[in-house]
Amino acid sequence: MIQFQNYPIEMFVLLFLILLSYLDFKHKEFPAVLTSGALFLVAITKYHNIEFGLLAFILAWFLMEFDFFQGVADLKVITMMGFFISSIGLFLIFAMLVVIFGTTYKILMVKVVKMKETDEIAFVPILFVVYITLNIVRYLT
């Protein structure tokens, strides 16, 4: 069920991810104040889901340590998305979506676009797709 009291913050994150996806595709960089500010705003408004925010941070840190993505911005965005999770089952779905979509995207970029594995690959667009998919799953459950 959609919770309408969260609608403004969810729309903010949706628009924010669209903006970051564009910047990540075109320029491969964006100001850290954007991601830090958005993470702070989401953490303040969704403080009751702090445990899932922390779990998402740990997941993102492990993925970054294993070179799944590069950059602290991706870590902040994954952590920010964790604050929207309200159950352990939904967190497991979130983790699987990040890993499956991210792996598929990385393979496609390396094989189809002929990028090197060491090149910076824009990861925020995948997180945008994960966010949309996660909201669909939340709506259906």
Image (cartoon, rainbow, N blue to C red):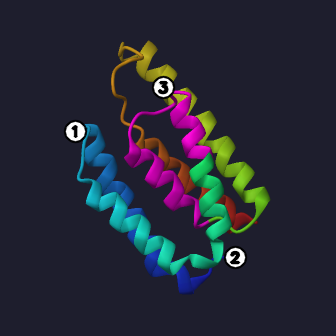
Q: In the rendered image, which residue does mark 1 sit on?
A: 26
Dominant SS of magenta comes to: helix
**Which circle marks residue 1 in the picture?**
2
In depth, the one of 29 and 98 nearer the eye is 29
The kind of residue tagged 3 is Lys
Residue 2 on the magenta segment = no
- Where disc 1 sits, the SS reads helix
CA gap between label 1 and label 3 equals 17 Å
Residue 135 visible, this orientation: no
Residue at the outermost bottom position = 5
Q: Residue at x 42, y 63 (%)?
A: 14
Residue at the outermost right position = 89
**Which circle marks residue 106 in the picture?**
3
Q: Residue at x 53, y 59 (%)?
A: 81
Nearer to us of marks 2 and 3 is 3
Q: Is residue 124 left or right of residue 132?
A: left
Q: Which residues are magenta?
A: 59-84
Q: Residue at x 62, y 69 (%)?
A: 50
In depth, the one of 40 and 30 nearer the eye is 40
- Where disc 2 sits, the SS reads loop
Image quarter (top left, top right, bottom left or bottom right) of the C terminus: bottom right
